[in-house]
Amino acid sequence: MNNFNFDFTLFDNFPEMYFLVNSAGKITRMNKVASDTLIQTVDEAEIFFDYIELCDRTNSEKIFSDALVNGDSKVIETRLFVNRNFLNVKITIIPLNNSDEKEKYLLVNVRDISEEKAKEAELIRFFNVAENSVNPIQITDLNGKMIYVNRAFEVASGYSKEELLGKNPRIFGSGKFPSSFWDKMWATISSGKVWVGEVENRRKNGEPFYTQLLISPILEKDGKVSGYFAIHRDLTEKRTLERQLIHTQKMESIGTLAAGIAHEVGNPLASISALVQVAQRNSKDPFVNEKLSLVKSQITRISKIIRDLVDFSRPSNYELELTDINKVIYEAVEITKVGTKAKDITFETNLSDSIPMLPLISDQIQQVFLNILLNAVDAISEKKEKKNEKITVSSQADSDWLTITFVDTGPGIKEENINKIFEPFFTTKKEGKGTGLGLWVSYGIVRSFQGDIKVKSKINEGTTFVIKLPIHS
């Protein structure tokens, strides 16, 4: 036993373990907490390093040695093996300088950090779960400013973490909900309750994304709210499928009615047309003939609408035949280029050579392509300022689908009209310039081949139509 000249019993009242260790690493003294923890006295104590976890022992001995040589305090985290259990500890090593003693000593403070480690491990587990969740997650402070977002949130919103932290979630809000909607949400979560609702937000690029949002208050031990945890469940695909289902059902209903309407209107119209022609032949009055010509032109327009209705609603008499889709695209482009409106438009085709022959009705699918191309030409012709106008058509295929893409440099379609363009009689053209049936008929043709047709557009940036047709083995 050494005679180091200070009263070590002073440390008996400390809540942490204290050891006096000599230069050889032997424990020469320990306080009461250390003795009770190790369940042994100083006389029975061994080398201090024998208690340190084996994998950290060599490094710990080096740190002890450095502290003795340099006279600097050191701190290490490791585990002590005590009573057949491991204890997470933080060890502070303090060199003691005393000129009266030939041997050097270290005062070693050992603090149990098992509870801290458990909380840290729990926090790491939560972080990993949150960071790798497929659902967008955000945490905000009491003022609604974001203090955490996970990777899924970055992907869903299109913003980086740096762009979001410190900002209010309103930066990606759609603005479509009244203030009363959000007031009710804040009243709910501020009172410590969970709020759930469906919201529409805007990605950084302006595209909408729909989510079911759950916001839960983060409560302290005393029940005080310290922040808010929000998790989103993506509803974009669900909303898209719902719209497609509603649209398909609407098309089926209209198709059923179309045949009957065409029949009921077509017969009287034929009679009116015949009477107009008789009147024209028997009238010498220029004014009357002018007005009859106007009536005849309107009858012709109505007849065109009737034919489109019949084409859509009547089962096709054509049979499927193997079709070279690239040849059909080429022919549709060549037909479109002949029109006077297309003379200042550049047509570009990027057609894949690896597309197989598909079982289609050539005339019908060509009509779809022509409808899209002619609409693109009409849209470009309406632009006030024209410069380097172009229509690009491309085709490509994988093992399951053939994709045909039409891209134009037209003025684009307003967002509120995007979901309406495949509806019958809807048109953005000036009155008398279109029937509003071309894309409706095109939609029906593509769907009859078990395909799909979608549109993307932005004002002043042009429009893209994407047609997908299945490749059957």
Image (cartoon, helix red, strand yellow):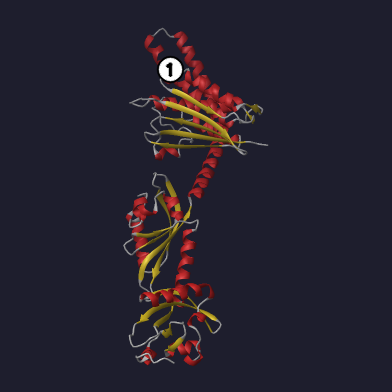
The residue singled out by tag 1 in the image is 340
Residue 367, by quadrant, is top right
- Horizontal and vertical percent position of residue 50: 52, 81
- Horizontal and vertical percent position of residue 96: 35, 82
In the picture provided, is 241 more to the left or to the right than 434? Answer: right
Residue at (42, 52) in percent of width and height:
154
Q: Residue furthest top?
A: 284
> Which class describes the residues within 10 Å of circle 1: few (<14), some (14-19), or many (20+)?
few
At mark 1, the secondary structure is: helix
- Horizontal and vertical percent position of residue 195: 41, 63
Residue at (43, 74) in percent of width and height:
63
In the picture provided, is 280 more to the left or to the right than 328? Answer: left
**Residue type indicated by callout 1:** Thr
Residue 460, by quadrant, is top left
Closest to the observer, 419 or 276? 419
Regarding residue 264, the answer to whether it shows in the image is no
Regarding residue 338, the answer to whether it shows in the image is yes
Closest to the observer, 2 or 280? 2
Quarter of the image for the C terminus: give it.
Answer: top right
In the depicted structure, whether residue 221 falls above or below residue 344: below
Residue at (38, 73) in percent of width and height:
220
In the picture provided, is 7 more to the left or to the right than 233? Answer: left
